[in-house]
Image: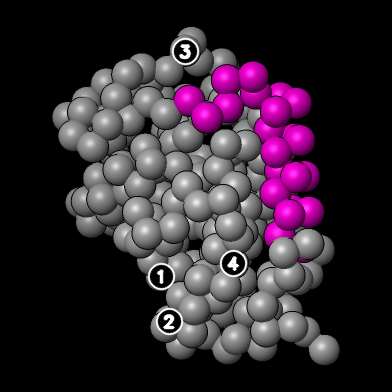
């Protein structure tokens, strides 16, 4: 029988595994380069354009499905990352403006400094199984200030969010507890490492890792991509 709550042992196991992988490949993990209005300072030099097989997989979360795709924007993110939370409304604004021409994609990249980023990713994956990935992602970002930085597992809170979204909680619990869900998140991390991701949020536009300085710069790159 599946427990109604994610056990602290299981949560700690996921967090330890995520931390190990990220630390092994990203010495600068935890870099946050966005500010609320300016989107922060630029990243380091970009690697060559990413291969589609690493950048987007069949099970990646596509937030928009344009009838005629002209560009693809992939974001590696951490739900506990303050910079990801700050840029989330900006990305939502761009989705509304460009969603009919650009496919927006989410990939997981929980950072070692954020103890509840792994459980948050698990909750998002469990919601995705019931067709509500975007709803859970929005909920996690909208409430980030209420749980981010806690040294205690917020898995019970994330389960409460699932209930508020009207999800089947038994199915939600089963997906959270399924080792395959953890492997799904770790696969995203492995791809991020291979692509040179060292912090969040990191964006790739049509396979090119973006270096951004302002919201206006970000938008202009999207405009140029759909011309």
Whether residue 160 is visible: yes
Earlier-in-chain disc, 1 versus 3: 3
Closer to the N terminus: mark 4 or mark 1?
Answer: 1
Point out residue 168 in the picture as x, y percentages from the top left corner: 58, 88
How many angstroms separate mark 4 from mark 2 (CA)? 15 Å
Q: Which mark is residue 44?
A: 3
Residue furthest to the front in view is 151
What element does badge 1 sit on?
helix
Identified at 32% across, 60% down, the residue is 142
* Position in image of residue 42 (x %, y %): 36, 17
Q: Camera-side residue: 171 or 70?
A: 171
Q: Position of residue 79 (x, y in %)?
A: 47, 51
What are the residue bounds of the magenta stretch? 10-31
Instruction: Please tell me in which quadrant of the rendered image residue 126 appears.
Output: bottom right
| Residue at (78, 62) in percent of width and height | 9
Residue that numbered label 2 is attached to: 165
Which quadrant is home to the N terminus? bottom right
Q: Is residue 220 above or below residue 2?
A: above
Element marked by disc 4:
helix
Q: Would you say 43 lies left or right of 182 here?
A: left
Label 4 belongs to which residue? 155
Q: Which residue is mark 1?
A: 135
Q: Nearer the viewer, mark 4 or mark 1?
A: 4
Please tell me in which quadrant of the rendered image residue 146 appears. bottom left
């Amino acid at each position: 029988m599946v427990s109604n709550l994610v056990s602290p042992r299981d949560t700690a196991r996921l967090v330890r595994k995520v931390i190990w992988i990220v630390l092994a490949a990203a010495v600068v993990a935890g870099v946050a380069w966005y500010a609320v209005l300016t989107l922060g300072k630029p990243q380091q030099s970009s690697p060559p354009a990413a291969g589609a097989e690493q950048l987007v997989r069949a099970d990646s979360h596509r937030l928009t499905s344009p009838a005629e795709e002209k560009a693809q924007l992939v974001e590696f993110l951490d739900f506990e990352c303050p910079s990801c939370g700050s840029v989330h409304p900006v990305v939502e604004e761009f989705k509304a403006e460009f969603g009919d021409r650009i496919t927006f994609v989410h990939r997981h990249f929980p950072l070692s400094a954020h103890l509840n980023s792994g459980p948050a990713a698990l909750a998002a994956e469990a919601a995705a199984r019931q067709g509500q990935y975007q709803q859970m992602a929005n909920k996690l970002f909208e409430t980030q200030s209420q749980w981010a930085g806690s040294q205690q597992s917020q898995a019970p809170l994330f389960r409460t969010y699932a209930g508020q979204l009207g999800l089947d909680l038994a199915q939600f619990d089963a997906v959270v507890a399924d080792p395959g869900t953890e492997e799904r998140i770790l696969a995203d991390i492995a791809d991020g490492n291979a692509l040179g991701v060292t912090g969040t949020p990191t964006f790739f536009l049509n396979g090119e890792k973006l270096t951004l300085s302002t919201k206006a710069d970000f938008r202009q790159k999207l405009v140029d991509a759909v011309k």
